[in-house]
Image (cartoon, rainbow, N blue to C red):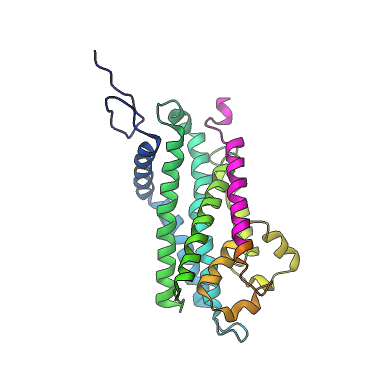
Amino acid sequence: MSDTATTAPGTRATSGNPPSALRVGLQRGYIEIRQFLRERDAVVFTLGFPVGLMILFASIFHGEIGHTGVDYRQVFISGMIASGIMSTSFSSLAISIAQERDDGTLKRLAGTPMPRASYFIGKVILVLATGVLETALLLAIGTAFFGLDLPQTGARWLTLAWVFVLSLVACSLMGIAMSSVPRSGRAAAAVVQPPFIILQFISGVYFLFSALPSGLQQVAAIFPLKWMTQGLRSVFLPDSFLGQEPAHAWEHGRMALVLLAWCVGGLVLCLRTFRWKGRRDG
């Protein structure tokens, strides 16, 4: 009697050794993307909402800031790109994982031979795909209609790359950890969205960060979104804008340290708090 390897849903059975966690994770990522694209409401909200806000605010507010030669719309669009990254990672993961825990999806997956790491690899692939698509949409509209200048040097493109990656990792880990907070899938959006909205208002997304009260600036500096918006301003705005920054510098070193600290802290929280079963399952 020949042996047949048992695999997780979405993978092909093969003889011999079972597929690796990475291979299963790649297949999970394909499934995650297909499921996401089938949910039109989720696609419109996740990708369309930041785009709609950017078009609305950039159409209403404009004008040069001080004597910097920078239009307010360029500052706002930089902030919206950072907000879009956080939306596609932190918000989406926190809400979707909480719902999957509540409806028993996580419990069923945990009971299959699928390596548990594969589940998270699949989520990372989804977040990466939606994050890149969201950023590309915002950049395309910003440059086509609102005067946003793309980076002119290799150094700025490199800054965009590492800010994007660190931001995506930090926000994804925060989202996974946050998914354990809501008591049910129905309550997930109500629990996750308010702190995200508050962070947008105090982190330089909608307003000039230097115009905020110093107390709010200090609170915002604890969280990654403030540093994400600052990092993207350093990519898309000229150095003439540095006079509008509280430290009169882009602070790339400090920015990287804060984002890395949130990556490490988020990973620790995930390892300590993540649950495969809902509260009702014990």
Q: Quadrant of residue 222?
A: bottom right
Q: Quadrant of residue 245?
A: bottom right
Question: In the image, 218: left or right of 191?
Answer: right
Task: Give percent across and percent down for residue 102.
Answer: 51, 34
Task: Give percent across and percent down for residue 43.
Answer: 40, 54
Q: What residue sits 46% from the left and 29% below the top?
A: 110
Q: Quadrant of the C terminus?
A: top right
Residue found at the far bottom of this picture:
67
Above or below, 56 against 40 in this view is below
Residue found at the far top of this picture:
1
> Which segment is the magenta one?
255-282
Would residue 259 be visible to someone looking at this image? yes
Would residue 224 be visible to someone looking at this image? no
Task: Give percent across and percent down for residue 77.
Answer: 51, 71
Q: Quadrant of the N terminus?
A: top left
Above or below, 49 against 210 in this view is above
Q: Does residue 265 show up magenta in the picture?
A: yes
Q: Does residue 101 show up magenta in the picture?
A: no
Q: What residue sits 62% from the left and 57% below the top?
A: 257
